[in-house]
Image (spheres, rainbow, N blue to C red):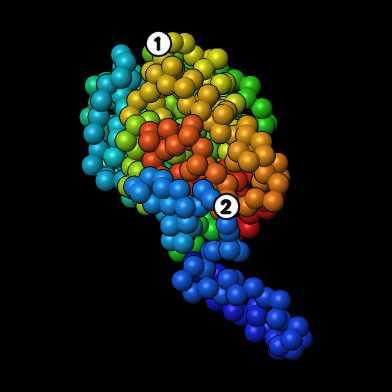
Amino acid sequence: MSRSKPCGARRRFIEGALGVAASAWWPAWADSENNPFAPPPLTYPSLDLRGPGGLTARDLLNRGYWPVPSLPPASGRIETVQVAENVYVLTGSGCNVVAVPTGNGTLLVDGGREEHSDALLAAVAELPNAGPVHTLFNTSWRPEYRGSNRAVAAAGGRIVAHRLAADWQSVRVVHPWDPDRPHPPLPKEARPNDTFRGFDSTPREAELQGVRVSYALLPFAHTDSSLYVYLPDANVVAIGGVTNGPGSSWTTIPYRGNWPEIDWWTGGRGNQIAPALQTIIERTNADTVVVPAQGGLLRIDDLDRHRRMFETIMSGRGADAIDNVYPSGPYGRDEVLARFLENEARRAYIDEWGDPTVFVYRSIESSWPTSSTNG
């Protein structure tokens, strides 16, 4: 994706319509072939401060980060680990899938990507006391969570999600940072058939084939349809994509690090990560096993540490503002990235979480008024 051609086309239009003199104001940097995303020349000193891998902020800006894959890589090699009595986590299908077999059937939280659904469901069928999947939760609309919807729906299963997840699954979604890989809609019969509305985090309780669950919306944290699903009897909570565990496959994508995905195109907001984590912390306990959608398992004290970090990052004002470009005054995304790299506390986060380029950009972009157009 390049802005150099549109910029050149815009210059030519102005020249044609108003004359060369009227277009002389058009800045030379806008047409740069080497750096189509470059801002006007910046002199902020931290642009030349060395960051991760010895790169400076200016290096990061000059290489850009678009396009970036909108989905984390998935090997398709399904591996299973038991995390509590009768509760299993299956990896390799695109996200961490939680399975609870009961003898009368199996409850799943998330279903991986569609191309890996057959392998995933075959592995689920081999679990002790496994039976047909009677319930599948989608912790968001996204393709790495909904991949088993068709199979579960065809077998007569229940698919639970927020209403917005079903709405997003009914349209073609094209992320602006990954325009060549659109996500097609699902047919009506494969979309969630047990949905709820509302934009607060009111918990909902249910007993599904003998499995007690508590679940709720995490408003705008990862997407606008993100959920957590808590299994109180096993003391296990699946938290979707609101934060990542260690070593997630996101880390294999350049400029991406292990930072959570802020899918602002479908309603995610960077400043809602910390409140979402606080909600989960308040509704679980110190011994709860936390299963993020990506990466290794977490504990509640890990979530609290993440919460404090995101709260610190997102509550900055003035020179440190990340969540909101408005308190940051005249500084745009690029200078905020430079400031992020310069701040010693932020640099400690970089050591743990990796390259922050995509995260900082998405955090700021998520504060912009948006009206995504998909179809």
For label 1, the residue is 287
Q: What residue appears at the point 53 percent right and 31 percent down from the top-left corner?
A: 310
Q: Position of residue 361 (x, y in %)?
A: 54, 49
Q: Position of residue 235 (x, y in %)?
A: 41, 13
Q: What residue appears at the point 47 percent right and 22 percent down from the top-left corner?
A: 305
Q: Indicate the quadrant where residue 287 lies.
A: top left
For label 2, the residue is 44
User: With 324 as the anchor, is 154 left or right in this view?
Assistant: left
Whether residue 124 is situated above or below residue 264 in the rendered picture: above
If the image is split into quadrants, where does the C terminus sit?
bottom right
Packing grade of label 2 (10 A; few <14, some 14-19, many >=20) is few
Whether residue 306 is situated above or below residue 7 in the rendered picture: above
- For marks 2 and 1, the one nearer the N-term is 2
Between marks 2 and 1, how big is the CA–CA gap? 46 Å
Q: Can residue 162 be seen in the rendering of this structure?
A: no
Q: Position of residue 46 (x, y in %)?
A: 51, 48
Packing grade of label 1 (10 A; few <14, some 14-19, many >=20) is few
| 224 vs 252, nearest the viewer | 252
Whether residue 209 is situated above or below residue 182 in the rendered picture: above
**What is the number of the mark on residue 325?**
none
Looking at the picture, which amino acid does disc 2 mark? Tyr
